[in-house]
Structures are given as structure tokens and as C-alpha cells.
Image (spheres, rainbow, N blue to C red):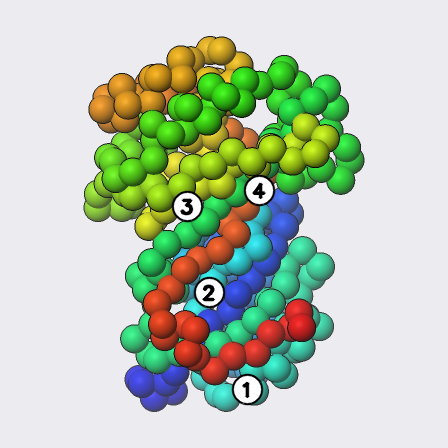
Amino acid sequence: MPPDAPVTALVVAYDGGPFAGWQLQPGRPTVQGTLEAALSAIHDAPREAVALVGAGRTDSGVHALGQVATYRAPNRRELPLLLHGLAGLLPDSVRALSARRLPESFHACRSATGKLYRYRIVNRRVALPFESPWAWLVRTPLDLGAMREAAGGLVGRHDFSAFASAGGQQATAVRTLRRLELVERPGGVLELDAEADGFLYRMVRNLAGFLVDVGLGRRGANEAPEVLASRDRRRAGGTAPPRGLCLVRVDYGPEWDEAEGATLLF
């Protein structure tokens, strides 16, 4: 494979329930491992020849609608045929939705300009069977006004150390949280949209846990600036469960929009 081989980028959706997260783990099912096994078969190449780089390392149980993963193909496959081949080899819990060819300098993680995560909450006495795997059931009524007030105090460029769990590898905890919006859907369903230039390890789940504590009256709506200033993870409270979290979209620059591409959906 020539060193300047173009990068193939896949947009991937998956149900994180059956997997131990995105990243390869010995002896455990992962999204990355599942995709690499299918790509290895399609390209008739060893697994190391189709090593994927993901835009984010989602945890066990976390879902995605728009994860992006890149690799340098060891041999050329037409993008529509690549997608149809993946559809035939992947389990129902994973789907490659589209593919693009990008310059060799493109990197799924480092080239990203932003991400959108969505955290889903069911706020009623019971969750329906088809909701439970993808949402956090909170039975006690939430004060949405207080949650929105607290969310407003978190938007902007801050050091988010208080909302970062141990285990992350980022050099700095400073991020620009562009939007933290709580949207009320019919039937007691809440969606928390978090959009930023980047996220720390478990940052969205920690933000969701803090806002639910506010909604339950355990924390004051005006505490967000104080928690941020503390840079102390213990001050932000609990972590929301993984099943409610979904990586919705990864944003890139003009090279993404201008790239040759194919889609499986339309």
C-alpha cells in the first residue's frame, strides 16, 4: 500500500448494548473489532491492513448514529460495493451508512471540528420495552426550568475538569461547549443535546448526571459556575448510565463535503 493512499472514511451507526465499547479489547466484542473483521473479508487482507481510527472511543453501552472511522484500504473497492458488502457481513447492531474517499492527511479524530452528542431520558413511572435499551428512566418528575438554567451556566469555553472522569488522555480539559439544550418530546421523553469542539472522557454523561440532580432538587440551578471553577470531579455528582448516550454527528471542514462519497440510505 503506497504511503499516500487515500483515506476511506465510514459513517457508522450502532447499538452499543452488545459491545464492550468502540475500541478493541482482547476477548471482548467491540464495534471496532466487528468492523475490522468485515473489512478484512471484503479486502481479502489481514486485520492489521484495515486498522480503523475512530472519531471517538465510545464506552460500553453507548450508541452512535454518526460515528466516523477511517482506514487506508489495502486495495481499491468501489464505495457503493464496499457499503453493500459491509451490510451483508455486519450484524444488525452495526451499520456503515456512508463512505468517502479523503486525502491521506485526513484523520477521523484530529480533523474533527466538533461533535454532537444526545442524551435521552424517559421521565415517567415506566419506560416502554423499546425505550429501555436507549434511555435513562428517571421516575421522579424533573424541574425542566431549573435544568435549563443550570445548562445555561455551563455553555461557553471553560475548564471542564469537574465533568471529566478519570482515565481520559487529553492534554487539556478546556473545551468550548457551544450548546447544551434540553428538548422536551411527547410522552415524558427528554433529549439533552450537547455540542462542542470536543469532549472529555464521560463528559456528556457527567453533565447529564449533574443536570438530573438539579432537576430532582438535589443541586441548585445556580451551582454550575461554582462546580466548574472547582475543577473537582467530586463536586459535579454522579455519572448518568451509558445506555442513554448517543454520538449523533461528527463535524469536519470543507474537505469532507467535497469528497467523493456514497451512501447506503438513499
Residue bearing mark 4: 61
Amino acid carrying mark 1 in the image: Arg
Amino acid carrying mark 2 in the image: Ala
Q: CA distance from mark 3 to mark 2?
A: 19 Å
Q: Secondary structure at mark 3?
A: strand
Question: Could you tell me if the residues under marks 4 and 1 are in contact, i.e. CB atoms within 8 Å?
Answer: no
Mark 3 neighbour class, 10 Å CA radius: few under 14, some 14 to 19, many 20 or more: many
Q: Position of residue 102 (x, y in %)?
A: 40, 78
Check residue 77 in the rendering and tell me which mark sits there, or answer none.
1
Q: Quadrant of the N terminus?
A: bottom left
Which mark sits nearer the N-terminus, 1 or 2? 2
Which mark sits nearer the N-terminus, 4 or 1? 4
Residue in front for this viewpoint, 163 or 150: 150
Q: Is residue 265 left or right of residue 147?
A: right
Residue bearing mark 3: 195
Q: CA distance from mark 3 to mark 1?
A: 34 Å
Q: CA distance from mark 2 to mark 4?
A: 18 Å
- Residue 256, by quadrant, is bottom left
Q: Position of residue 184 (x, y in %)?
A: 60, 33
Q: CA distance from mark 1 to mark 2?
A: 17 Å
Which mark sits nearer the N-terminus, 3 or 4? 4
Which mark sits nearer the N-terminus, 3 or 2? 2
Residue bearing mark 2: 69
